[in-house]
Amino acid sequence: MIKLLRWSYLFLWIFLWGCASTSGNEIDLLYQEIMDVHDEVMPKMGKIRNLEKQFRSAALTSPNATELMSQAEVLASANEAMMNWMRNFNNDFQGLDEEKKEYLLGQKKQVYQVKELMNSSILQSVELMGSAID
């Protein structure tokens, strides 16, 4: 009976340890995914700022000034969204594994939204440049 009890405790301990390490590994993977997205779009901030300057400059002499300034604002918003996300991201979030996972899932959603905003603003700008900035 004592052997059965010892084996039961051993298996319980192994099970709990396995669950804990899986959760920690999942948290590490989430964090890495977030950082990968950040690293992918961060270099595009320079391009966004340059495009914004081009649109503002072109708006000074273009008959499409309103459209160009509007696109410059879209670019500025994309840049500011990335800056806000970076300022607010807490890479040293403390809490239980479940709290960390919840926090990182929220951050993952936000960083993907920022990525989409940045990429779409660049694409729109390149398309508009071909037709409006001459």
Image (cartoon, helix red, strand yellow):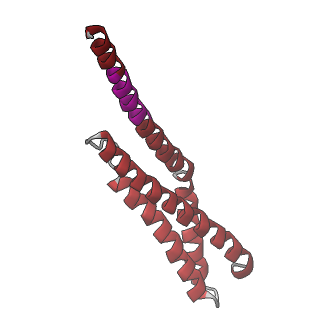
Residue found 55% across the figure and 51% down from its top = 43
Identify the residue at horizontal 54%, vertical 57% (top origin): 46
Task: Determine if the magenta segment contains residue 13.
Answer: yes
Q: Where is residue 117 in the image (x, y as percent from the top left)?
A: 54, 66
At x 32% / y 44%, what residue is drawn? 98
Q: Verify whether residue 62 appears in magenta.
A: no
**Which x, y percent locates residue 83?**
41, 59
Q: In which quarter of the image is residue 19?
A: top left
Residue range highlighted in magenta: 12-25
Q: Is residue 68 above or below residue 6?
A: below
Q: Residue at x 59, y 85 (%)?
A: 67
For residue 76, above or below residue 3 = below
Quadrant placement of the C terminus: bottom right
Q: In which quarter of the image is residue 21?
A: top left
The kind of secondary structure the magenta stretch mainly shows is: helix
Location of residue 34 with respect to 24 vertically, above or below:
below
Looking at the image, residue 29 sits to the left or right of residue 47; the answer is left
Give the image location of residue 13, x and y in percent.
32, 21
* Image height of 7 relative to 88, above or below: above
